[in-house]
Image (cartoon, rainbow, N blue to C red):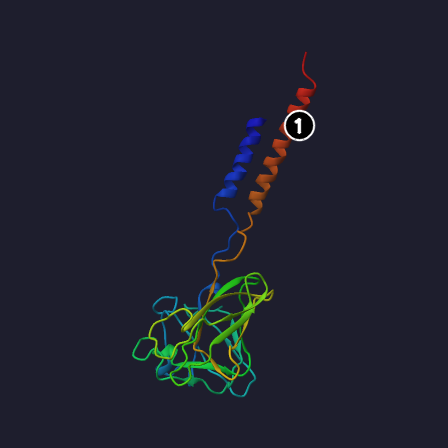
Amino acid sequence: MKKISYLLAGLAMMTMSSPAYAVAPAATIDALIDIKFTPSVPLDPKYQFSGSAVIGNSGDYWNNILPDDNSGAVSTRLLNTGGLLPGGNFTFTSESLGLIGKSSTSFKGTAYATLMNTYVYTYGTTDFMTIGGLSVNTNYDVYVLTQGSKTDNTGVLTLTGTNVLGSTQTFTQSGISNGTLSSFQPGQNYMLETFKTDARGNLTFGYAAATPGKVAMINGLQIAASSNNGPGPTPEPASMLLIGVGGALISAARLRKKKSADNPVA
């Protein structure tokens, strides 16, 4: 009996330590999502961009967001970097939904010029961006590209959203580019923050200038599931069953041993 008990307990422990967790394969929806802002017809070649930015790979698909100045917000169905659904959806507000700013200096002469020379902006208020359709109560790394322009580089950007602890937190850009940087520098022309989705799978953050009366710009976004997501996966039901059976048999063996000790044979 003791051997059987220990064998079952051992099997249960092996099941726990082996890759037998009920882990779904990485969902398409949690693949990297890239967003850029386009001031004209999205298919206009001069605004097309594909490939990596701060993260990613060559050939990655970018969602071109074209504002509509007849609505109070823009809502767009997103594709992931493979150009596939489901990639979530995107809603945002900005200072002027009918206008995307253009800069002739951002990443000029580099492969990233098409990505970084257009932007949305806010002035004197807080605007919002929401990526919906993501995994619920999950942390995502958000790369906010914010190059600025040579003619207006005074607006230090702040981002406000739900942090990994579930609290509201504001993050402030540590520096600012004068619009002439041609490589991605943390704090200078991009911010990396980790935000948590809500119970509906929405990731929302506000953006504004740290100083009232200044312009805050966002050139693009990259959103990826974060590695910082708390406890590990839950064991499969089969694993739990083995653990329960093993535990019960061990308890029974201990009880039998105790009874034998209490009632020795003459």
The structure residue drawn at horizontal position 58% and vertical position 46%, both measured from the top left corner, is 237
- Give percent across and percent down for residue 244: 61, 39
Residue extending farthest to the top is 266
Q: Is residue 131 visible?
A: no
Q: Nearer the viewer, residue 163 or 247?
A: 163
Residue extending farthest to the right is 263
Identified by mark 1, the residue type is: Leu
Q: Nearer the viewer, residue 249 or 55?
A: 55
Q: Residues within 10 Å of mark 1 (few under 14, many from 20)?
A: few
- Give percent across and percent down for residue 82: 41, 68
Q: Quadrant location of residue 154?
A: bottom left
- Give percent across and percent down for residue 48: 37, 79
Q: Nearer the viewer, residue 25 or 177?
A: 177
Q: Quadrant of the C terminus?
A: top right
The structure residue drawn at horizontal position 61% and vertical position 32%, both measured from the top left corner, is 249
Residue assigned mark 1: 255
Q: Is residue 69 visible?
A: yes
Looking at the rendered structure, the secondary structure element under dot 1 is helix
Q: Nearer the viewer, residue 257 or 141?
A: 141
The structure residue drawn at horizontal position 68% and vertical position 23%, both measured from the top left corner, is 259
Relative to 193, residue 5 above or below: above
